[in-house]
Image (cartoon, rainbow, N blue to C red):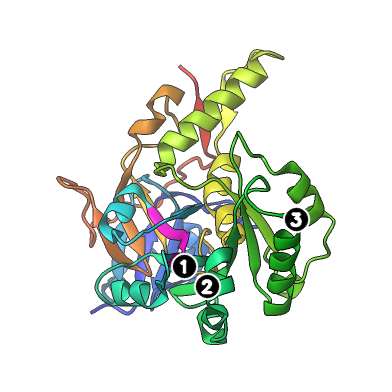
Amino acid sequence: MFLKTLYVNGMIFTSNQEVPYAQAMSVSLGGIDYVGTTEGLLNSLGISNLYDPKLSEYEVIDLKGRTVIPGFIDADIRERAFDGNELARKGIIGVCALGSLGDEEVFQNYLNASNQGLNQYVSLYLPWDFVKKHPEAMEDKQKFIRSRRVHIAGIEIPGEREISEDDYREALEFCKNNYCQISVKISDEDPSSTMLQLLMQEQSWLEDLDIPPARVHRGGSDFHPFDAVEKELTAQIEAEEAQRNQDVYGLDSIIIGYTKLASHYGGFLDIGEIKKGGKACFLILNRDLSQIPVEELHLVAPEITIIDGKIAYKEEGSTFKLADKSAAANQDQGLGIKLVEK
């Protein structure tokens, strides 16, 4: 068994502004310990080239130019999210979910599911009505540890048309006193603008955790990451074309929104980015994102989903070799993810 896995010759988008693009990374014990160039990775290990006999000490995966991005975070609050295989197929490595079903808390259910193959990280939000009936559900502070695979992030309240101002303020004070997030469910019919304006005036009570104390979600819909990316990018293109004609659009900010930012707003720790010290949760895609028509984005999918350095999903019929020892000589892959409209 190899203690370290080297991924080389890839086109890696990290969602990390400090090192946005890379060719290589190394993974050990489920974490990332190097992100950079293939040459830099080899040098860090005292290896001269990809044919050096010392490489036999490592599992070497030649990405051969494949696109790698961080795993997606489903930041809307789902009623339930127990199907780890389906989530991994979509490239989802973290999900926000309701912390109760009816009058039953589901924290233990998710722990049991994790022990039985649910690889995703889960951030739970307890409905305010449930918390009022069962305040003891918030007493065990071990459940709030963000590094746990399953943790409680806070409470969920309905939009302002379904909750009184007194109840809203009581929920807000509860979150401050219990040091947790408050998540407001909004919709097109109920944007809860007054409530959100009041929340924006609040001073953060989670400043030292570097996560937002308040957040919004829509819930309900089934999250298909690249469908969402295509829809958002198409809207961006249409808006920009009204001002000027251009044929190259950046994909970076949209991926960051569904990875790093979604992780941040969901209260997760060390996922959503490919960075040194982070968890090894990323996707090897079936399409090259450096050149792809906008209208084909929905066809992009993970060929491989990696969670904590292990395979959580592999596309049926994939010819990708996970232990490819015939690594080609290092080449400049021309990094810089762009999207070209054809």
Mark before the other along the chain sequence, 1 or 2: 1
Residue 199 x, y percent position in the rendering: 77, 56
Asked if residue 2 is among those painted magenta in the image, a careful observer would answer no
Question: Overall secondary structure of the magenta stretch?
Answer: strand
Q: Quadrant of residue 60?
A: bottom left
| Residue tagged 1 | 99
Q: Which residue type does callout 3 highlight?
A: Glu
Q: Residues within 10 Å of mark 1 (few under 14, many from 20)?
A: many
Name the residue tied to disc 3.
165
Q: Which type of secondary structure does the marked residue at label 3 adopt? A: helix
- Where is the N terminus found, in terms of image quarters? bottom left
The answer to the question of whether label 1 and label 2 lie on touching residues, with beta carbons closer than 8 A, is yes
Given the image, on which type of amino acid does mark 1 rest? Gly
Name the residue rendered at 69%, 44% in the picture.
192
Tell me the crowding category of disc 2: few under 14, some 14 to 19, or many 20 or more residues within 10 angstroms, Cα based: many
Identify the residue shown where x is 33% and y is 32%. 299
Q: Are marks 3 and 1 in contact (CB under 8 Å)?
A: no
**Residue at the disc numbered 2:** 152
Q: Nearer the viewer, mark 3 or mark 1?
A: 3
Closer to the camera in the image, 62 or 141: 141
Magenta stretch, residue numbers:
92-100
Determine whether 197 is above or below 263 in the image: above
The quarter of the image holding the C terminus is top left
Residue 51 lies, in percent from the top left, at 30, 63
